[in-house]
Image: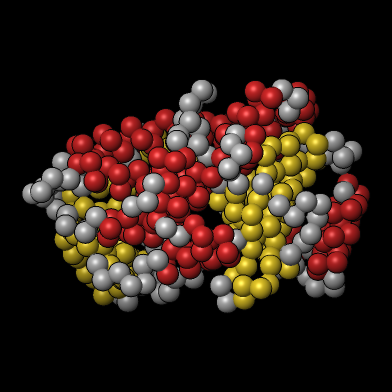
Amino acid sequence: MKVAIIGAGTAGLALAKMLIHQDIEVTLFEQAPTLDPVGAGLLLQPSGLAVLAHLGILEETQKLGAEVTGLTGQLPNQQRIVDSHYAQADSRFFGIGIHRATLCHVLTQSLANERQITWRFQHEITHLEDKGSQVIVKGHCKDQPFDEAFDATIIANGARSRLRPAQWVKLDKPYPWGAAWTIVPDCIYGDPKILHQFYDSTSMMMGVLPTGSLPSDPQKRLSSIFWSLPTGQFDTFAKAPYSAWLAKVQSRWSDLATCLDAVFKDNQPQWLNAQYRDVVMSKYGQGRIGVIGDAAHAMSPQLGQGANMALLDAWALAQSFSKARTAKDMDWHVVWQHYHELRHSSINMYQLMSRLLTPLYQSDLWWAGSLRNIMFSWMNQIPYFQKQMAFTVSGLKTGAFGQMNYDEIAKPM
């Protein structure tokens, strides 16, 4: 069996590894000339770590990443309105802060000795044709057209994908708010194993995430700093003097400003622009074509689930391939039925929660910040809600009362 995967990001690389393990030949198409991911740090939740354990690369990820035990969020008056720790869900749980390029490196290294993978860089895919018995992948490579037939094609080329079937898309629009990111030498603020977030109403939000190290310099530990802002304000913000930004932080969280000043010294931060989309689909696969990762369900980063949901997608699709495959053929109806059973409820829940929570942190609604402060301060006092919030952050929830089984996902291939 020959499967094409379009996009060599988190979802595509993880799925390639799992399909190769099932003796499937994989061709990975990537538009970039090399695997050089952009972006700053991300937080791998227990859900994503379960998939990495399944792949056999969790230990290597731990070496390069930074262990995170929970997240906190505080107001300018020092009141802590978010105080969620993975151990409240399960004493074994933790997260890993990691640079996107480092995660890509670990996944790529796991494929280094595989003979059943073909890498196709600088290939722009423009069109897919499901012929019933095969999928024709069409596009360009260095301005030369090409087409190739595969038994199935999986679209995993990110939130701005133009390949997802239009008739499956219910919603596809950009979020009005994004974030400026920068990576700095380790910024030790408070507990070094916590993702620290800071809020002032809904117009100001920032965070400090321990991010581990790059493979090229494993001894140098890093942190990621993010600053929320409307997407149209990024250029102005990035060009403004560092001192003006630091003054805003100083007036609200002076101890954090002291830490940042020590990290940046007299150097202007190099900000990266992070923009997000809201993508909702009625289905994730049919026939011999499927969509996974951000291409299938992009959302606000408010719950920090992007990479983790991509890894879960890859795991679920590999499980579905295994279930539907016979000695002679693949039952594609069973593939997508089983995949939707595994992923539909979880994706729906996190997309809904993201849509509901984002205005409480990033919006122009004058009342939303007060509602958030009252609601979360109250919930933090009740053990039941603390546990449910921890399960939610862990990325394992499938609904109000259900969650996925970590151990079931983490079983070795």
Residue 222: percent from left, percent from top: 69, 65
Q: How many marks?
A: 0
The structure residue drawn at horizontal position 31% and vertical position 38%, both measured from the top left corner, is: 339
Front residue of 365 and 375: 375
Left or right position of 231 against 376: left
Q: Please tell me whether residue 164 is drawn above or below residue 385 in the rendered image.
A: below
Left or right position of 84 against 34: right
For residue 39, say whether it is visible: no
Outermost residue toward the left? Answer: 328
Picture colour scheme: secondary structure
The structure residue drawn at horizontal position 60% and vertical position 49%, both measured from the top left corner, is: 95
Residue 399: percent from left, percent from top: 49, 26
The structure residue drawn at horizontal position 44% and vertical position 41%, both measured from the top left corner, is: 407
The quarter holding residue 234 reads bottom right
The structure residue drawn at horizontal position 54% and vertical position 66%, both measured from the top left corner, is: 102
Q: Please tell me whether residue 195 is drawn above or below residue 201 in the rendered image.
A: below
Residue 386: percent from left, percent from top: 67, 29
Q: Please tell me whether residue 176 is drawn above or below residue 240 in the rendered image.
A: above
- Quarter of the rendering occupied by the N terminus: bottom left
The quarter holding residue 345 reads top left
Q: Please tell me whether residue 35 is drawn above or below residue 322 in the rendered image.
A: below
Front residue of 204 and 232: 204
Left or right position of 213 against 146: right
Residue 391: percent from left, percent from top: 57, 34
For residue 103, say whether it is visible: yes
Front residue of 163 and 191: 191
